[in-house]
Amino acid sequence: MSFRKSRTLPSMAIRFVRLGCTNRPFYHIVVMNIRANQHEEPIEQVGSYDPLPNVNNEKLVALNFDRIRYWMANGARFSKPLEELLGLAGFLPLHPRTVLNAWRNRLNKPDEEGKNENKE
């Protein structure tokens, strides 16, 4: 008799699939088998992400939270970049790297008020 716990690994992953042209990436957020190549047919597309800012300096994200919640309940894992994006969207807790990068950017940002006072 074996006392070893059988642990099943999730077979589904929610991740980015890169589309678009050279220097113009566009990502679909898809549910796929973990071992599948990114160019294979996905099980379902649950969103899209355009990382380049548009005219209004906005990065566009479209997410179907109901379907993401469904796949999450069925044991699908998230890729690390997608975890960060879902944290920024408020669906998951903020990733520690996101908080750390924001803190570093705040420290490295030149103080606008200090520069204006020195010029006068």
Image (tube, grey):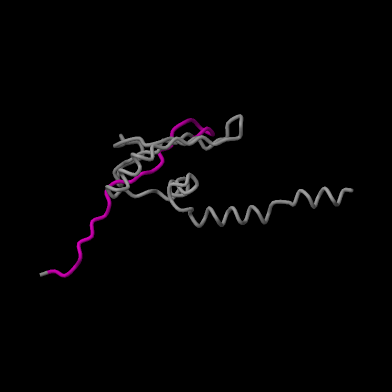
Inspect the magenta stretch and tell me whether residue 23 lies in it: yes
- Residue drawn at (29%, 37%), measured in percent from left and top? 43
Q: Is residue 82 left or right of residue 107?
A: left
User: Nearest the camera: 55 or 16?
Assistant: 55
Q: Residue furthest left?
A: 1
Res. 46 image quadrant = top left
Magenta span includes 119: no
Q: Nearest the camera: 9 or 25?
A: 9
Total marks in image: 0
Which residue sits at x=51%, y=34%? Answer: 60
Q: Position of residue 99 (x, y in %)?
A: 55, 55
Q: Quadrant of the N terminus?
A: bottom left
Q: Residue furthest right?
A: 120
Position of residue 20 in the picture relative to residue 101 (left or right): left
Estimate the x, y position of residue 54 in percent, counting from the top left: 58, 31
Q: Position of residue 119 (x, y in %)?
A: 87, 48
Residue 15's place in the image compared with 19, above or below, is: below
Instruction: Give left or right: position of 105 versus 4.
Output: right
Please determine whether, in this image, residue 108 is positioned above or below residue 14: below
Q: Position of residue 45 (x, y in %)?
A: 35, 35
Q: Is residue 47 above or below residue 83?
A: above
108 vs 97, left or right, is right
Identify the magenta region.
Answer: 2-25
Q: Residue at x 44, y 33 (%)?
A: 19
**Residue lying at 29% horizontally and 48% vertically, measured from the top left:** 73
